[in-house]
């Protein structure tokens, strides 16, 4: 399997190459030259596998340059009981109203980002060891990517992490998880502005090829395709567990829908990948918060990213994003995988601030199965409280956005899965307000709230960021 850029300016590269590079050198995003596909029988053959074994089988379709035995070892280490102590790694939990939660927050930082990041931690370190190289990861986080990346790489001797986060826009728990780390290779940088500003700096550094090469810069945001491929695994797992009790005939006609709380479009893009690979997903429902640029896009075909000043600070802060990087990968698909059309579309977006793709609405809804909706503060308060009172299950505000929107898209006879985003302990204040109870915090993590914090505050200044990285990068 080889990989190319959405904008056409990249020589086809291997999976290991794109793991290390992150963003394509022409400023585009890396995509597979073709999407692998499994037929019904091939997916059935995966049914009895453990989660690490399933991950190895799916990821081998992408990571064709990594020996199968090695890939299996990487997945076993990534999804070990030490990292994911819950039986099965990813539990399914019915919550009424024909909805089921897919439990993605059983990892070390209590958020779904661990599911892909633990694999990246193993895979990137393996590639670096094979090549005798080191890597300085520069990332941007709206809340959960930062801690997931830092916990995945904190013990990797060939990797340093520089994580940008927006000042004052994460929950106290999220800040404590990141800023309490003391490893000298972990650098937390709280920047003025919003997540989109931090992500813009990240992309600027990644496309400055001289700076990137000199300082061995890589990325683990969902602009790194390795993240998306690893996330596609749990869509396969969900299908297999939903259909374990069905007969073969029932399985052959089975469909389910998925609602995904979405900020940077990586998690739901992984669902799109799984759908293309053969998982029978009927609807991919995107749940947005008040920063509902993507909801508008999937309803109208108009893509209008907002400026930083127009990006709302909300009670589901990990979704406070108005320019979702991964939408480029999907629009590339929508435009027939034509890099010239994609580049022209992005020039139009840069020149006018909007992109009119309304002529593709039928494909958005019927070919690709997308739907969407918006949830606001009052909605998530009501949803957290309602789910707790009716089921005894506490959910975090982002998952609540998903549940609220999922309820609007349930179809008779079609199971609806909601992808859990994080443990409610990461957002205790809003959960307490909504449900009247304090979410349980694991003792070892509760200590982090009182631990000293190590963070560099920085202006929204690319030159200051470059200088800091140059001074502190592994060399």
Image: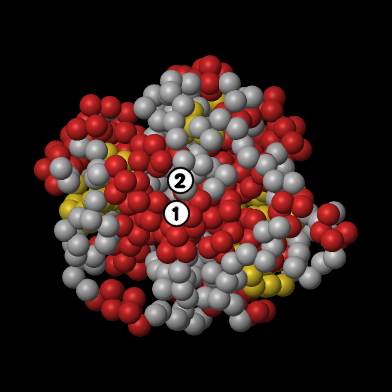
* Location of residue 191 in the rendering, given as x and y in whole percent from the top left corner: 25, 47
Looking at the image, is 144 positioned above or below residue 461?
Answer: below
Q: Residue at x 47, y 48 (%)?
A: 67
Mark 1 crowdedness (10 Å alpha carbons): few <14, some 14-19, many ≥20: few
Do labels 2 and 1 touch, CB within 8 Å? Answer: yes
User: Can residue 152 be seen by looking at this rendering?
Assistant: yes
Which of the 4 quarters of the picture holds residue 408?
A: bottom right
Number of marks present in the image shown: 2
User: Can residue 226 be seen by looking at this rendering?
Assistant: no
- Residue located beneath label 1 in the image: 70
Judge from the rendering whether residue 375 lies leftward or rightward of residue 175; answer left or right. right
Please, which residue is most extreme toward the right here? 249
Q: Disc 2 and disc 1: Cα gap in Å?
A: 7 Å
Judge from the rendering whether residue 286 lies leftward or rightward of residue 13; answer left or right. right
* Location of residue 178 in the rendering, given as x and y in whole percent from the top left corner: 29, 62
Please, which residue is most extreme toward the left here? 471
Looking at the image, is 191 positioned above or below residue 306?
Answer: below
SS category of the residue bearing label 1: helix
Q: Residue at x 45, y 81 (%)?
A: 440
The disc at residue 66 is 2
Choose between 397 and 464: the one closer to the eye. Answer: 464
Mark 2 crowdedness (10 Å alpha carbons): few <14, some 14-19, many ≥20: some
SS category of the residue bearing label 2: loop
Q: Residue at x 67, y 42 (%)?
A: 37
Which image quarter is the C terminus in?
top left
* Location of residue 41 in the rendering, given as x and y in whole percent from the top left corner: 76, 52
Looking at the image, is 151 positioned above or below residue 424?
Answer: above
* Location of residue 353 in the rendering, given as x and y in whole percent from the top left corner: 47, 26
């Amino acid at each position: 399997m080889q990989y190319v850029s959405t904008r056409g300016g990249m020589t086809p590269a291997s999976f290991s190459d794109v793991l290390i590079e992150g963003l394509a050198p022409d400023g585009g995003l890396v995509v597979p030259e073709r999407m692998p596909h499994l037929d019904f029988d091939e997916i059935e053959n995966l049914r009895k596998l453990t989660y690490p074994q399933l991950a190895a089988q799916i990821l081998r379709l992408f990571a064709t340059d990594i020996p199968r035995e090695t890939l299996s070892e990487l997945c076993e280490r990534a999804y070990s009981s030490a990292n994911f102590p819950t039986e099965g790694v990813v539990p399914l939990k019915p919550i009424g109203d024909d909805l089921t939660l897919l439990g993605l927050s059983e990892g070390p930082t209590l958020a779904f980002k661990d599911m892909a990041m633990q694999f990246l931690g193993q895979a990137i370190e393996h590639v670096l060891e094979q090549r005798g190289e080191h890597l300085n990861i520069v990332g941007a986080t709206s809340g959960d990517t930062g801690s997931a990346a830092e916990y995945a790489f904190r013990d990797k001797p060939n990797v340093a992490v520089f994580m940008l986060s927006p000042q004052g826009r994460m929950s106290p728990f999220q800040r404590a998880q990141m800023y309490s780390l003391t490893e000298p290779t972990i650098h937390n940088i709280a920047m003025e502005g919003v997540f989109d500003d931090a992500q813009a700096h990240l992309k600027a550094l990644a496309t400055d090829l001289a700076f990137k090469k000199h300082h061995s810069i890589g990325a683990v945001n969902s602009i790194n395709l390795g993240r998306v491929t690893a996330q596609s695994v749990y869509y396969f797992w969900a299908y297999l567990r939903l259909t374990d009790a069905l007969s073969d005939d029932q399985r052959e006609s089975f469909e389910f829908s998925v609602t995904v709380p979405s900020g940077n479009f990586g998690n739901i893009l992984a669902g799109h990948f799984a759908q293309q690979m053969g998982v029978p997903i009927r609807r991919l429902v995107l749940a947005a918060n008040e920063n509902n640029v993507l909801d508008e896009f999937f309803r109208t075909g108009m893509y209008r990213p907002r400026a930083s000043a127009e990006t709302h600070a909300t009670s589901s802060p990990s979704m406070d994003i108005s320019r979702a990087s991964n939408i480029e990968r999907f629009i590339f698909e929508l435009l027939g995988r034509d890099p010239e059309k994609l580049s022209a579309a992005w020039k139009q977006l840069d020149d006018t601030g909007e992109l009119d793709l309304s002529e593709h609405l039928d494909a958005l809804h019927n070919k690709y199965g997308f739907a969407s909706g918006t949830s606001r503060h009052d909605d998530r308060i009501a949803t957290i409280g309602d789910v707790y009172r009716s089921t005894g299950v506490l959910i975090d505000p982002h998952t609540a956005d998903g549940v609220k929107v999922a309820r609007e898209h349930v179809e008779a006879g079609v199971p609806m899965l909601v992808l859990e985003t994080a443990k409610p302990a990461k957002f205790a204040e809003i959960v307490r307000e909504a449900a009247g109870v304090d979410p349980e915090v694991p003792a070892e993590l509760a200590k982090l709230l009182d631990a000293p914090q190590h963070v560099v505050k920085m202006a929204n200044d690319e030159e200051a960021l470059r200088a800091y990285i140059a001074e502190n990068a592994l060399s």
